[in-house]
Amino acid sequence: MRTSIALATYQGARYLAQQLESFLSQTRPPDELCVSDDGSTDETLDVVRTFSSTAPFPVKLVANPIRGGVNKNFENAVMHCTGDVILFSDQDDVWLPSHIERLVFPLERDARIMAVASDSQFVDETLKISGGTQAQSSRFSNSLRAATMRLPHNQIELVLRQTIATGHGMAFRRSLLPLLVPFTTTWRSPPAAVSA
């Protein structure tokens, strides 16, 4: 399966290089990186262009002429992806080396699985662990987790509506795009995290 990373950027020069470097250390490298920038005026575009000049995989950069906000920016990044599996990436996250491999493995093993999500560790700007994991947070209570496992017919709705899983820790089959686009206008990014 071909994998695409959908990365949305905006004024991200301060943190972006760390995330881009984490793509290079993946045990399963991506097949492409699609970056949608929402009108950055800092050095974000320069960071992406410098990275793309030496990256061992294709990097597509789309600079939006008009700001659309985080949701439209991610939607734009996803729409430029050509892989069988799409992984979301926030500009201020850092992926552990096995991130892509661990998320894609269940999708390759079982054609019935349409999307997967990982837990994440919360970190500060120096990548020092600053708290527990997303699953340990109040957002993902034991009762909500039990309900998700008990009700398979609406698992995806529970996961998305209750923010059990966030974009930076997700991978999904491209075939889901017709159900996901256009993206909701109420989705927001969580604090920075290191994804497993």
Image (spheres, grey):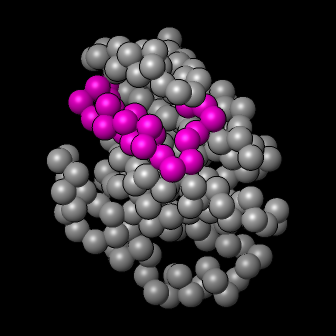
Image position of 125 (left or right of 56): left
Residue 51 found in image quarter? top left
Residue 60 found in image quarter? top right
Residue at (65% x, 42% y) in the render: 3
- Nearest the viewer among 34 and 76 is 34
Spot occupied by residue 154 in the image (x, y as percentages of width and height): 72, 73
Asked whether residue 19 is drawn in magenta, I would say yes
Q: Give, as a single range, the part of the protein colored magenta.
A: 11-33
Q: Is residue 119 visible?
A: yes
Above or below for 14 versus 50: below
Q: Quadrant of the C terminus?
A: bottom left
Spot occupied by residue 32 in the image (x, y as percentages of width and height): 60, 31
Spot occupied by residue 45 in the image (x, y as percentages of width and height): 39, 16
Numbered circles on residues, count: 0
Image position of 188 (left or right of 43): right
Above or below for 9 versus 103: above
Above or below for 89 versus 128: above
- Nearest the viewer among 50 and 16 is 50
Q: Is residue 187 visible?
A: no
Residue at (55% x, 41% y) in the render: 29
Spot occupied by residue 117 in the image (x, y as percentages of width and height): 56, 62
Residue 90 found in image quarter? top left
Residue at (31% x, 51% y) in the render: 192
Asked whether residue 16 is drawn in magenta, I would say yes
Residue at (42% x, 43% y) in the render: 25
Image position of 100 (left or right of 149): left
